[in-house]
Image (tube, helix red, strand yellow):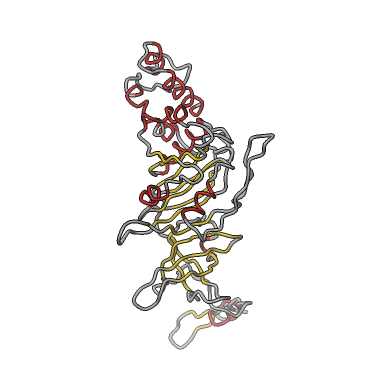
Amino acid sequence: MSWFTVDDDDDDVPYGEYADHEVRQRPNPKANRPRTKRRPEHSDAVTGMVTAVDRGRYTALIPGDARSSERTVLAARARELRNTAIVIGDRVHLVGDVSGDEGSLARIVGLDDRTTLLRRSADDSDRLERVMVANAEQMLIVVAAANPEPRVRLVDRYLVAAYDAGMQPLLCITKTDLASPDSFLENFAALEVPVFRSAPGAWPLEEIREALAGKTTVFVGHSGVGKSTLINALVPDADRAVGHVNEVTGRGRHTSSSSVALRVATLGAEGGESGWVVDTPGVRSFGLGHVTNDGILRGFTDLVPYLDECPRGCTHTSDAPDCELDAAIADGRLDAIGAQRVESLRRLLS
């Protein structure tokens, strides 16, 4: 049998199993449209701020406009964002049911660029970072003057994390009725970090509210220092759980199990802009495994004049030859507090 036949125009024309009209298309088993890499533009999406995260559900606040009032919606994450961490403070794009009615569920389909990002790791050897809060301008470090005892090196870690994230650090000393915080604060006097002193019945609420106005501030601190108590005083309807310090171990109990953003009103100023506070669970350690050496150095701005005099390539560690930090300690330019700061820096670097 011949493979080809000749038509009237003497052109070779394939036939049989090689004919074009015999090629069979594979059927679509799901009977749906072919997949495409093109994604919807979601031009109708609205923007909201994430205020809480709970087991794959995100609470977002959508500001009011001329057509609708401010409302809180519950949302799920779109499939294309399944590998993207969404945290409190993120500005997200929402589609679907954004009415905020009971039983409604919107969908997060986009994420705005973040201006700041607070991260921590499980410990210093763990390079896997945990994203905590996005787009916060400030970090309020809450420390108790006593019960539990303040830890200088933990505050150093908070300062490093704040500067690495691009946040302005603030310091609040609670329970000043139990002990004087002056000797503790000497460790950070050269940093010019704003300090608030707090005690039962003598809370500096107006001063703190003024510092929080118009900004998002994340509250961090050791368990049991009174962080949630302070937030309840600033936001009366917050109803954050408070705990006590174990009399045997001297450690506080973890009372805040999740992070949440709360609006704090500004008092004493007409037209004052409200701010946001982010309450985070109390921690006993704050890993900086994800922070580079340059990021650590940004947390010790009081030592910068001496670091600038170090030889090129100096690691600033205890075994670094001709490190200017050692010379400054030896000739008295750095006092006992400064020497402790150097020790803290070197512990973090190593």
In x, y percent, where is residue 187? 43, 28
In the rendered image, the vertical position of residue 77 relative to residue 198, given as above or below: below
Residue drawn 52% across the image and 46% down it: 227
> Which image quarter: residue 54?
bottom right
State left or right for residue 148 relative to residue 135. right
Residue drawn 56% across the image and 32% down it: 149
Q: Nearer the viewer, residue 112 or 52?
A: 52
In x, y percent, where is residue 112? 40, 59
Residue drawn 43% across the image and 68% down it: 62
In the rendered image, the vertical position of residue 344 relative to residue 4, given as above or below: above
Quarter occupied by the N terminus: bottom right
Residue lying at the far right in this picture: please name it: 248
Residue lying at the far top in this picture: please name it: 331
In the rendered image, the vertical position of residue 232 relative to residue 73, given as above or below: above
Residue lying at the far left in this picture: please name it: 270
In x, y percent, where is residue 238? 52, 58
